[in-house]
Image (spheres, rainbow, N blue to C red):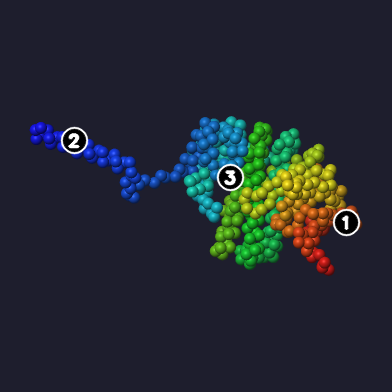
Amino acid sequence: MTPVNERASRLVFAALSLAVALCACGRGDPAPVPEADRASAIPASPLEVALEFSRLLALNDPACYELLAPTLKDSALVSGEPWAAFGRWRGFDASGRLTEILRDSTGSRTSYYCSIRRMEHPAIVRIDFVLSPAGWLIEYFGEEIPGEVIDSLSVERTARIIMSNPEIRFEMRVARQLLDGVLIDSVAHYGSLTAAMDRGTSFEAYIASLNDAAYADLAYSNIRRAASMQIIQDRATFNLPAVPVELSGFVAVWREFAFLSKAHLRDMHESMQILRATGEYAPPADTPDDTERLRVLRANFLAVSDLVESLDTLSTTFPAILTIGDEEPLEQQIIYLDPHQTEQRFENQIGMTVWRALGVEMNGDQDPERVVYFAGNLFLFEGTPAGYRLAWRTYADYESDYHSEFSSRPFLADGSREVTLIGNSGAFEYTLHYDGGAPAFGRHQLGSVE
């Protein structure tokens, strides 16, 4: 072999040896990439998330659910395919307005105001986002509310259409009971605040004066009320898959009212938490337009609900929703109150009573009340000519049970009665009756002279 050929052979052999060595290195762990050479993926902006959701929704692709916040996602999955949950969009409005990012203890949020037309439902006018560890997710869709829906002249027409739709009538009764519960909770836990402010005490001074237990009562009340509004919003969104066209605007009012109410409660709770921790009070950032919009939506919903309640005189049973706990989501139980039964109860598979309802005339108006016991809490449903309304309830287990002492006895000469219960320990007797037209609850120690 000539020197030239020998040198060429050595070069080829060296090249092959280097290639083999590189392949061998590839079979092991890759060499670390210098920190300066690494690239970080930039999370999608809220607008990009909305655009991707619109693209996937146009394909009816369930992958769009992955762009939703957990609460909205869980509720949407109940409806099945995306078109059933959110309708079919005609297109995406990329010329909308994105608001500033607001931060509180529950996360960072922003909203995209737009106008997105849909085929079967009112237009989308707002998309709300929340920031999660995975990036921005869609938390809520605000819907357009036609002006004629807010017009008081449409209340009677809307109520009569609802009367002809059993599903919507059922959901409206449940929503109204939850709303009444929110008011009862507010009066029970914020009554002393109202009285103090009426005497000239400031909100800041009142919060500072509370001990930890009293402050916790206020905080848990906020959580329960916000959770109740979330239930109203979810049921109106996902338990009514086939809303008649003539009611679509009113159902949009229903959902928007629940969402805005919860948003207000969340902001108020955050302000109270900051005040308690730092002594500095920053009121919720509600604009006059926000406050007025919420007032109008609430008034419209209540006007229709009041009329539906007065018209619904033919129902043989009446739905009621029982909620317990002070963490979201609240534990829920739907029951049906039957005015033709003196007592109702439901037992589980092993014979334990889950809930019990006792019919008793307590206020002398000849429309018997119904006292319900569920999971350590009492609910008082006041009898009306058209059914029942929630008039009072407890929020914590007071160690009562379902035994035979859950009964009633005469209270006043006008034929009214009071309900009595004996605690599990046997040490206390609890009483519930009407005093001056309002429910009154108390206890006394057995064997004492109190």
Left or right, residue 347 beside residue 129: right
Judging from the image, what secondary structure is the residue with disc 3 in? helix
Q: Amino acid at mark 2?
A: Val
Name the residue beneath numbered marker 3.
71
Name the residue beneath numbered marker 2.
12
Mark yes or no: residue 381 visible: no
Residue at 63%, 43% in the rendered image: 234
Residue at 51%, 50% in the rendered image: 108
- Which is nearer the eye, 219 or 284? 219
Left or right, residue 191 beside residue 339: left
Mark nearest the camera among 2 and 1 is: 2
Q: Amino acid at mark 1?
A: Pro
Contact between marks 3 and 1 (CB within 8 A): the answer is no
Judging from the image, what secondary structure is the residue with disc 2 in? helix
Residue at 74%, 34% in the rendered image: 164
Provide residue 205's location: percent of width, then percent of height: 62, 66
Where 439 sits versus 295, above or below?
Answer: below
Name the residue beneath numbered marker 1.
410
